[in-house]
């Protein structure tokens, strides 16, 4: 009972997204309660934190990298390029936004897509007198479905990486075909669902005034962050076979960009601390401890009973569906901590199938992924309130099709 109460408290806190101090206090309270009641032993808590520490380190570093990139105007420059290449055509703009969202999610993780990129692409659409909703939904869908290619694209991938016998490059090779078919499903589906909004209304004037940029040090300040991010991505692939975890290149990139950004007056050390979101890092660690207790209690046995013991297509699809349902109930981060260790004896393909459900399937409901809730909150600040009806129409239409297509692609890449 203690574990369930703590898990609910953590998930409600994440969904409400309170002030960082409140988030940190709830996380600490959950940990102290599980330890004080001996629901989780100190040794078990340490064992739960050990694999999470590199993931949290990467999270902190990549949030700083993303913040410096945003303040230097990298996202604005990319959106301006897409806007110029669209030639005032909302359909072309949508294609550019779709590709841009896929790239940002792959390289800088889904949080950068929903929080930093979404407002920029909405502004680009408004600059053409077009609706910002198609581009906004492209960012949302690709923040989940588009985070398949690299281990660093999603925290669920990073959490699963220690259980895989794959390097950074081999992970990408296994997930390349599933991602390709998912992108086709998402693109075609979004074009059909938003066909009426991908036309500029006659009473909406076209404006050449771009949305205000956050950059404060010149129009080309984004070039150095772009170069550092490129080198960071290369380092992920080159260093992975030597056992270097992704948090190391990410930390070096964050330190480099932070030093540069402070010297250029783009941000202060205090800004960097806020961007790193240490309270959320603490929340992730607390979640790991609580889920470890639940897994040792009843949840682990329940998962073992429902998971299949094979890796045929039907088995892989069932694994992906179970992961999707677990994401809906527990949110995908906590679901990853429960499901992936249970699948380890079945090998890499089974774990990758679970990741399909934990990423693509997480887009099925608001509660499936924290990215969904962050996206909704971001748009609310931008005066666009996503309706439940439209969200569920899009998610219920595209998620099952994308999930089945991805599992089929995964089953042929063994």
Image (cartoon, grey):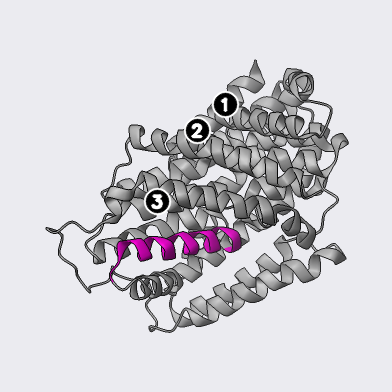
Closer to the N terminus: mark 3 or mark 1? 3
Instruction: Using the image, tell me which numbered label, if any, was put on residue 287.
Output: none
Residue for badge 3: 191
Q: Earlier in the sequence, mark 3 or mark 2?
A: 3
Neighbour tally class for label 2: few under 14, some 14-19, many 20 plus, Cα within 10 Å: many
Q: Residues within 10 Å of mark 3 (few under 14, many from 20)?
A: some
Q: Which residue is mark 1?
A: 329
Q: Is residue 322 left or right of residue 398?
A: right
- Residue 96 in the magenta stretch? The answer is yes
Contact, mark 1 vs mark 2 (Cβ under 8 Å)? yes
Q: Where's residue 282, x and y in %?
A: 61, 44
Determine whether the residue tagged by mark 1 lies in a helix, strand or loop. Answer: helix
- Residues 352 and 162: in front is 352
Q: Position of residue 334 (x, y in %)?
A: 64, 34
Question: Which residue is located at x 55 percent, y 53 percent?
Answer: 183
Q: Name the quarter where the N terminus is drawn.
A: top right
Q: What secondary structure predominates along the stretch shown in magenta? A: helix
Q: Can you identify the residue that label 2 sits on?
A: 367
Q: Is residue 126 visible?
A: yes
Residue in view at x 58 percent, y 37 percent: 361
Q: Magenta region: which residues?
A: 88-107
Q: Residue at x 22, y 74 (%)?
A: 208
Q: Image point 39% across, 37% down: which residue?
A: 391
Left or right of residue 89, residue 145 in this image: right
Q: In this image, 357 relative to 43: left or right? A: left
Q: CA distance from mark 3 to mark 2?
A: 25 Å
Q: Nearer the viewer, mark 3 or mark 2?
A: 3
Mark-to-mark CA distance, 1 and 2: 7 Å
Please determine whether, in this image, residue 381 is positioned above or below residue 33. Answer: below
Of the image marks 1 and 2, the number of the one nearer the N terminus: 1
């Amino acid at each position: 009972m203690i574990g369930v109460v703590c898990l609910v408290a953590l998930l409600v806190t994440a969904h409400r997204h309170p002030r960082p101090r409140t988030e940190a206090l709830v996380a600490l309270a959950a940990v102290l309660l599980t330890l004080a009641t001996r629901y989780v032993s100190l040794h078990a808590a340490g064992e739960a934190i050990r694999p999470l520490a590199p993931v949290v380190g990467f999270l902190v570093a990549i949030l700083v990298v993303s913040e410096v990139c945003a303040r230097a105007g990298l996202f604005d420059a990319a959106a301006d390029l897409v806007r110029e290449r669209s030639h005032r055509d909302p359909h072309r703009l949508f294609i550019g936004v779709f590709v841009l969202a896929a790239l940002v999610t792959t390289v800088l993780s889904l949080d950068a897509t929903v929080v930093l990129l979404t407002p920029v692409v909405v502004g680009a659409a408004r600059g053409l007198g077009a609706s910002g909703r198609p581009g906004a939904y492209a960012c949302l869908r690709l923040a989940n479905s588009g985070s398949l290619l690299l281990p660093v694209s999603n925290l669920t991938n990073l959490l699963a990486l220690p259980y895989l016998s794959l390097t950074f490059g081999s992970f990408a090779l296994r997930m390349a075909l599933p991602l390709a078919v998912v992108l086709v499903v998402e693109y075609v589906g979004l074009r059909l669902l938003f066909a009426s909004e991908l036309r500029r209304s006659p009473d909406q004037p076209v404006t050449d005034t771009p949305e205000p940029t956050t950059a404060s040090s010149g129009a080309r300040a984004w070039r150095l962050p772009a170069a550092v991010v490129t080198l960071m991505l290369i380092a992920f692939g080159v260093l992975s076979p030597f056992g270097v975890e992704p948090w190391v290149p990410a930390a070096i990139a964050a330190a480099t960009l932070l030093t540069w950004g402070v010297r250029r007056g783009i941000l202060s050390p205090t800004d960097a601390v806020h961007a790193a979101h240490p309270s959320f890092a603490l929340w992730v660690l607390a979640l790991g401890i609580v889920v470890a207790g639940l897994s040792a209690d009843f949840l682990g046995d329940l998962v073992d009973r429902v998971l299949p013991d094979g890796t045929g297509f039907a088995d892989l699809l069932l694994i992906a569906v179970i992961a999707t349902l677990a994401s809906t109930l527990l949110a995908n981060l906590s679901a990853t901590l429960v499901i992936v260790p249970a699948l380890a004896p079945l090998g890499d393909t089974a774990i990758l199938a679970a990741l399909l459900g934990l990423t693509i399937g997480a887009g099925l409901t608001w509660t499936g992924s924290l990215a969904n809730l962050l996206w909704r909150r971001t748009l609310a600040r931008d005066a666009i309130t996503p309706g439940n009806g439209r969200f569920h129409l899009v998610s219920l239409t595209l998620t099952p099709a994308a999930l089945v297509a991805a599992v089929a692609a995964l089953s042929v890449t063994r």
